[in-house]
Each structure stands twice: as C-alpha cells, then as structure tokens.
Image (cartoon, rainbow, N blue to C red):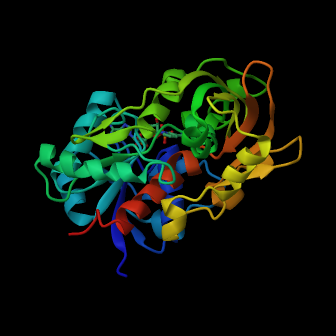
Amino acid sequence: MKKLKVGVIGGTGMVGQRFVSLLAEHPWFELTVIAASARSAGKTYEEAIGARWAIDVPMPESAKSIVVKDAVGDMASIAAEVDFVFSAVDMKKEEIVAFEEAYAKLECPVVSNNSAHRWTPDVPMVVPEINPEHLAVIEAQRKRLGTKRGFIAVKSNCSLQSYVPALHPLKDEFGLEKVLVCTYQAISGAGKTFESWPEMIDNVIPYIGGEEEKSEQEPLKLWGKVEDGVIKTATTPAITAQCLRVPCSNGHMAAVFASFAKKPSKEEILARWADFKGRPQELELPSAPKQFVQYFEEDNRPQTRLDRMREGGMGVSVGRLRPDTQYDYKFVCLSHNTLRGAAGGAVLLAELLCAEGYFQR
Ligand SMILES: NC(=O)c1ccc[n+]([C@@H]2O[C@H](COP(=O)([O-])OP(=O)(O)OC[C@H]3O[C@@H](n4cnc5c(N)ncnc54)[C@H](OP(=O)(O)O)[C@@H]3O)[C@@H](O)[C@H]2O)c1
C-alpha cells in the first residue's frame, strides 16, 4: 500500500511532538508537513522546537529538517499537499472551529485532538474500540460542508479514556446506572513538564478548568446513537466527576465507583474486561493494543510509572475491583494521556478511518 501523506497542525506542541514521533515509523502514514503558529513558521522543526522537546523518545531524524509551515497562512498549500491532517493546537475555540472547517472545506480531512468540535452534532467523537459506528455521521457532515472528501473527526478528552473503556463492556448487559469518578491527571495533560511548571513539584492542584464537565458529559456522546444525520447523546448513566492535577509527568489515573440495574458478579466483570475486543482489534490496526483492558490482581497496581506504557501506551490498565458500601463496585483505571488519551488515540482513529475507506480519493 502507498503511504498516505500526513500533516501535523500544532506539531511543535506537547501532543504535536507525540504525533511526530508516532508517525516517524508508521506503516501506513508518512509525515510530510508540520505546521504551527507564525512564530515557528519558516524555521526547521529542530530550530522551532529549540529546548521544548518534552517527550521521552528522541526527535526523529526525518522530522528535524522539515520546514515548519504557518497552519493558517499556508492552509491552501498544506491542504493540497497532504491526504489528511492531525490537529492539536492551543488557540481560541472559535479560531479552531473556523480553521478545522476551512481545512475540511479544502477537501482535507481533519483528525482532531482539540475540544472545539466535540459537540458539533454531525462531528463524530470516537474512541475506536467503543463507538466506531459513529463514523457513519460523516456522510451528513459532508453534505452540510458541501464536500466530497473533507470532514472533521475528533477524539474525546484524555481524562475519560481510562474509565470509559472499563465501563463500556458492562454498560448494556448489566444496565450501568450511576458512576462517580475522581481523576488524578498528569502535568503533560496541560502541555507542561516539571521544568516549565515547577509549582507542580510536591504539589496537587484540585482544579483543571473545564475537565469535570468534559469527564461527565463526553461519555454520553460516545454512548449516543447516529440518528437523522446527527449524534443523539445518551441520557444514562448519571456521571459525577472531580479532576485533580497531580505531580506525574504522564498517565491519568481514575478512581471509579459504579452501580448497575442488574449487579454483575466480580467474575462476570473480570471476564468482560478480559474478552473486550473492538473494531481496531478485529481489523488488526497497526496501533491497536492486543489486550485493550488489562486487569491486575496485585493490590498496588496499576501504577502510573510502571503501567502507563503497557501496549505502547495504548492499553488501559485496571485494578482493585471490589464491592463498595455506597455503590455496587469500586476500582482504579490508568491510561497514558498523550498516547491513548491524545496523539496515539488520534492515530488509531485515523487508522480506522483509513481501513473503513474514509480517506479515499
Ligand atoms: N496534552 C494532552 O495530554 C492533551 C490531551 C488531549 C487533548 N489535548 C488538546 O490538544 C491540543 C494541544 O495541546 P498541547 O498540550 O499539545 O498544547 P501545547 O503544547 O501548548 O501546543 C500548542 C500548539 O499550538 C500551536 N499554536 C498556538 N497558537 C497557534 C496559532 N495561532 N496558529 C497555529 N498554531 C498555533 C503552537 O505552535 P507554536 O509552537 O508555534 O506556538 C503549538 O504547536 C489542545 O487543544 C489540548 O486541549 C491535549
């Protein structure tokens, strides 16, 4: 198969750097364009990054000499040069809404990490193992945009990518009714390192702007249905969330409490997690984890540092399943926020879009 040409919009940022490193060796996609703000445009990627390289693998040699483009000013030439773009930028919501739609209207599909379009009713928000069928709404979106090929698909917020995968295989069979979740989120989720955010050393901050709302509401879009050209959001389960910033570089943990209409046994829950396979596993997509949800029997697992890189950072790790006094069960989940929760999740979504024919010319 001829590799598809890919651009990364926001390639100099924390998530963008992950995209650049994941695409360096990708079997289906070839990184040909990196774009960022006008501040970085015209410099080589290596110069534009300077001392900002913040991830745990070296900058790929093939990316160093790519000359960074201006994501907005060079839009038409970027859209003409690539088969699709990934988007991960730090800009105002209305600016992101406008530039992502402009790329789509130039017939360049956009796979986005940004939250700007997550609630656009005909934009699919997809965790590939959970709601791959939502891609069907792209047909209606293309009609609205007046495009043949261009569209926007987004991934959900990083906080929920640990606990939604654990709840999903239980939800319909056992009637998931109520969820309480507390998340413990790494500083890379704010695009930061301990060097750039020294206040986080030896500290916990009990507030992440907008995160609790996203953690409560986005799962309901993931569990919604495509009807009449839009995604109709699910109305259950009821979810309440508290989100804390903790002094970890990478890896979001979640402490989860859940109640069901038909309470499952512990063995039934463990069996559903062990057997959980989605469309990416069926299609054997290159970035799909073989064991999506892995349960640890040890009382002190999963641990952020030990387990966040399981399955290349694409697996979800779960532990400490036990009965609760207020809810039916409680347990702990972990996922890597810039891999499964951001760039890796978007690359997996792009692989799904590719395998399902959405990038065809
Ligand atoms: N970090 C995570 O774990 C995570 C997880 C899920 C989703 N996200 C989302 O992903 C997006 C990026 O997050 P991040 O942590 O990577 O942010 P970041 O490290 O602050 O990077 C921001 C990027 O946006 C670019 N940018 C800023 N202003 C621009 C403009 N006017 N035009 C074009 N590009 C511009 C920057 O380019 P310059 O270098 O030229 O300034 C940089 O490449 C955000 O929407 C965030 O909410 C992040």
Q: Looking at the image, is 361 positioned above or below residue 308?
A: below
Could you tell me residue 328's position as x and y percent? 73, 27
Q: Nearer the viewer, residue 58 or 214?
A: 214
Quadrant for the N terminus, please: bottom left
* Snapshot quadrant of residue 163: top right
Could you tell me residue 37's position as x and y percent? 34, 42
State the residue at coordinates (50%, 62%).
280
Q: Looking at the image, is 178 positioned above or below residue 163?
A: above
Instruction: Point out the residue furthest to the front here.
Output: 262
Using residue 297 as the reference point, say whether residue 176 is left or right of it: left
Instruction: Point out the residue furthest to the right here.
Output: 299
Instruction: Point out the residue furthest to the bottom here.
Output: 1
Using residue 164 as the reference point, say whether residue 40 is left or right of it: left
Q: Nearer the viewer, residue 220 or 227?
A: 227
Could you tell me residue 270's position as x and y percent? 74, 49
Quadrant for the C terminus, please: bottom left
State the residue at coordinates (89%, 41%).
299
Could you tell me residue 325's position as x and y percent? 80, 20
State the residue at coordinates (56%, 24%).
239
Q: Is residue 287 visible?
A: no
State the residue at coordinates (40%, 40%).
89
Q: Nearer the viewer, residue 281 or 271?
A: 271
Q: Nearer the viewer, residue 160 or 279?
A: 279
Using residue 173 as the reference point, say whether residue 71 is left or right of it: left
